[in-house]
Every structure is written in structure tokens, then in C-alpha cells.
Amino acid sequence: MQPDLDPIVPARPEWREDAPFSPEFGDGYYSADGGPAESLAVFIEGNRLAQRFAALSSGDLFVIGETGTGTALNLLLAARLFLDHAPEGARLALVSSEKHPLGHADLARCHEAWSGFESLSTDLRAQWPEPTPGFHRVELHERIDVTLMFGDSLEMWRRQRCDVDAWFLDGFAPARNPSMWSEALFGQIALRSAPGATLASFTVAGAVRRGLEGAGFTCRRLPGFGRKRHRLEAVFGGHWSAQRQRRGHALVAGAGLAGACTARALARRGWTVTVADPAGVARAASGNRLGVVYTTPSGIATPQNRFYQASYLLALRRLEALGAGERGIGRFEGVVQHATSARHAERLWRAAESRLWPPGTLVRESGDAFLLPGGGFVEPPTWCRLLLGDARIEFRPEALAAFDVDRGRLDLAGGAELDVDALVLCCGAATTRFRQAADLPLRTIRGQVTEVRATPRSRAWRRARCHRGYVTPAWNGLHSVGATFDLHGERDGESDIDDRENLAALADGLPGHWQDLGGECVEIAGRRAAHRCQAADYLPLAGALEPQSAGGIGPWLNVAHGSRGLSSTPLCADLVADSIGGLPLAVDEPMERALAPARFAARVHRGPR
């Protein structure tokens, strides 16, 4: 496997007179005459954002693109201005690239010196991602999303396919950082620009003006800010008009983790959502008493490995932002991954030694055991109910019987008909009972979890541990031990055989923990069996079922999360909701293609609808 992105090297600024300075590029992050004032003059006023925000209508979408996130000052100023001037119902998408992102401490030190957007700053820093390559989504406000793209600006913007209304070009000075001002990047900026898009920058260097003009911008030089003589404004060819976000009524079939995350993502983007599931909320594979939030680390940045990393890290941020720990529905004190083979051990060692996993995200505990410090466990049913608790989401205990996307009409098993603007199937392997998806390569894997009574010694455990199976710390007096992996198991109900298999795997992989639970005298207090859904290539299916259905009713899919639904469903839900709404995507194009159901297009039914 070949990596498609390089690891991220974080910024290491020096502090000079309480302002950050880059020794690598020999330049400061903002003007000594006042960072916020300079950003307002150059970038905010240079794009006439106050007037343009005020002129938006409900349902309009405004996209700002940036090269050089830096301290995120421009993003915060734009967000505050949008909330002050834009009407309710309008939406702002901030998309910014950064090759060397600042760390949490330096970011906090910058923001503490500024006033006027403390709440936005706090929310941004609370969700500030780890320095890993690719796209990272931050929910800055109910009406504002930030997509931080960590990597080379040209490469990141090649992987983004939104239409940008206003640009902030804010890299270090061209003489010190020429790659940020290349003709190739200007050409990519032009490709991503909406007709009539505006652009602002602090630099008026001749090469910059000529490069932008060659890419289709009309440039003009204006008086600069502070000690800088000039600044630049530019306009792309064509007539500008506001974009429209797509909203309406969506039906989500399935009320497990995938369905709950998808419904919440759509509701947050202004949709009204009906969630239909005849079994109720989290009654199938998402109904286990506890689930572990973890991933299998790799040191090679392929789209598939990056998805496992990015989805896990996003899930942790999302669980924290929505207060899973504070609400008492989980605990996040780390997950220990024990190698199950020499090959697995080598993979963990390579991941730990690579720069793909930043310090503090993957730590060797002992031997071939590695700690994911941010991981933990949560109650999936409670988490699903929390996600579905939005006033814009209605739950109906009914099944989707059939759908006709050409008519926009859905039939529920009870006889009711619904007119909808989007349909998302989040019903696992049951997806294939619809003729449009009958040939998708989905399989069901039966698994059983064994619940074991805690002992005085086992109550001291704080971390979940994954080996060939897994074991959680005590939660309400019980440990979850699991789970069997029966690829050909089609029976329903629980089995004593599966309990013995779970405990035998624990005794073999973690003999000390097995002894702490009582060894041969372990007390089984309960069990639960369910069928997981998995695709042939182990990745989820997230996106339009067929390419031609993108931008329409669908159907859209968010299925096949296997045993990692707690980690993988939030990012897939963002991808689906962004795609349906016509918003900048939370994932880059290679990752989008890796997750797209269309990767199995040859197998998808092509008959009449």
C-alpha cells in the first residue's frame, strides 16, 4: 500500500513580544500593528463581507476559501460577522488549508489576546483536530461549519470540490513561502471559484498579481494596513449570485448508530427528518449495553487507513462536544489494543513510530500493547436516543416498504405514504431487500456479547482492552466481554457456546483479566446477540447508491459499519448530509471515492425503477 498523503509536521512558532513568529519561514503570523484590525481591513472588508452577508436570504449558502489557516483569526472574524449580519436560515462554510497547523497551546495563547469572539474561539479550540493529514470538520455554530484541510494547499484544494464565493490568501510572504503563491495553486483557486468570486490578500507582489490575472482574476492594488503600503483585491470573471443550500424533508430508514448520526447531521443542516424503524431505536446491532470507541492504527496514510483514523478522532470530538462523558453514558480514559499476531504487532509498532499518529494519540503501554489515550466506551442505545432528541427529528416505529425516487414517494409498511426530498438507507444488511440495492455485496456477521459480574479486583479497571475480542471496565456492576464473529451464523438468539467462546478468548488473550473476573468461577449475568453488517472490502458505504442519484432524492446509503459503528458513523453521516445538501464535504475526494457505494457499481441493480 502506498500513502496518498504525507504526515503533518506541526508548526513550532517562537513568541516575540507576545506574537507568534515562524522561524522556518522567517515571518510573523499577523501584524505587530494589530492582528484583528489587519484581518478586518485586508480580508473582511477586502471581500465586502458585511454587505454580502446582509444581502443573503434564508436558504443561501456562502463559502469562504482560505490558503493558510494560521491562527484561525480570519475564520473567527468572518464567523462573527456572519452571525451579526446574515439572516436566520443562511449558512456559512469556512474551508481552509494549512500545511503546518498550530497546536492547542499556541492557538489558545493567540486567542487570549483578542476580544469579541470568545465563545466562537472556545468552540473552535475545543474541536481543534490533531495534526493528521486530510480534512477535519468543526461544528463552529449551528449555521457555520469549518473544514480544516491539513496538508499542502495545492494538494488539499485539488481534493476539495466546493464553489468558493470569497477567498483569503494568507500564507507567509511570497519571498519566504513561494509554494503558497504558485501559478498551479492560482489555477486551482480559479477552478474552485464561483462566478464573480472575490479575493483578498495582504501581498501585491508582481508574481502574485500576474498569476491571479492569468487564472482569470481582475486585480487591483489598494492602500495597505499599518506598515504595509498596499494590499490586494481581486474579482473572478462572471456575475456573482448566492448559492443555495438544499433543504427539505428527509426520511432516514434505520434508527441505529448510522441512522441516528445521519438524522442529527441532516437536522443540523436545516432539514426536517423522519426516522423510521419498526424495531425501535437501537434495537439491532447498535443495541448492545456498551460499545468500545477505538480504531486499528496504521502508519501508512492510504485513504482507507486515513478514514479509520479520521473517523475515530472525529467521533471522540463529537462525543465530547455533545457531553457523552458528562451525561454519564460513557467514559473515555483510553483503550488498549493488544497485538493478536506478529503481523498485527508489527503494524502497531509502525503506526506508533510513524508521524501519522501525533504524540499523545497512540502510546506504547507495554510489550505489544498500545494505548489509544482518547478512546473509551459508551452506551450505544442512550447515545442514539440523544442524537435523535432534536426537535426537527420525528421517529416513527414503522418500516420502509418501498420507494420510488422518480416520484419522490415512499411507502411505509403501515400503509402511510410520505413525500420526501431525500431518502437515506441506514438499515444495515436489510438494505439489500430493496430491489435497487439487492446486488450490493453486503454480508451479515452474527456476534454475541457476554455480560459478566464485576469482582472486587475487576472494579479497579479503568480502560477497555481489545485483543481477539474485548473487555470493558465495570459499568453498573457488569463487564461486557465480546464478541464472537460468526461469518456464517444465521441463527437468532443467544448461545451458551458463544459465552464459552468469549471467555476462552479472554483467558487466552488477557489471562490476568480473566483471573480477576473469577477464572473458572466467572459469573455470567447476561448476553446479547445481533447481526452486524459489513461490506466485502470492510469499508462502510456512504454516499449516493448510484452516481446519477447524487444531488437528488437518492437513495443515499450509510451502512456496513461492522463492529466499529461508534467510531465510523459520525464522519459518514457528515459526508452523506453534506452531499445531500450541496455543501463542502467533510472528506477529501480519494476518501469519498473509497466510501462511495458506486465502487460496487457493476453489482448494483440497473433495472427499471
Image: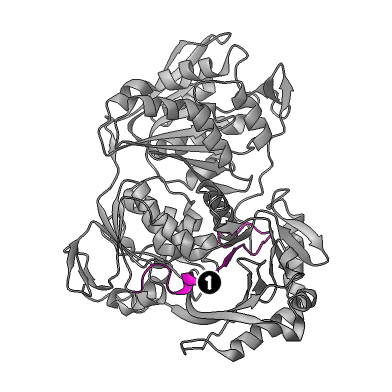
Image point 59% across, 43% down: which residue?
A: 151
In the picture, the quarter occupied by the N terminus is bottom right
Is residue 385 or residue 68 the one in the foreground?
A: 385
Mark 1 neighbour class, 10 Å CA radius: few under 14, some 14 to 19, many 20 or more: few
User: Label 1's element?
Assistant: loop
* Residue 47 image point, x, y percent: 39, 22
* Residue 323 image point, x, y percent: 53, 49
In the picture, the quarter occupied by the C terminus is bottom left
Does residue 169 sit above or below 512 in this rendering? Answer: above
Q: Amino acid at mark 1?
A: Tyr
Image point 50% across, 31% down: which residue?
A: 119
- Magenta-tinted stretch: 279-307
Task: Using the rendered image of the protein, determine whether residue 542 is visible from the camera's viewpoint.
Answer: no
Q: Which residue is mark 1?
A: 538
Task: Using the rendered image of the protein, determine whether residue 412 is visible from the camera's viewpoint.
Answer: yes
Asked if the magenta segment contains residue 297, the reply would be yes
Left or right? Give the position of 458 relative to 182.
right
Left or right? Give the position of 33 relative to 531.
right
* Residue 337 image point, x, y percent: 71, 66
Does residue 269 sit above or below 440 in this rendering? Answer: above
Give the dominant element type of the magenta stretch: helix, strand or loop. Answer: loop
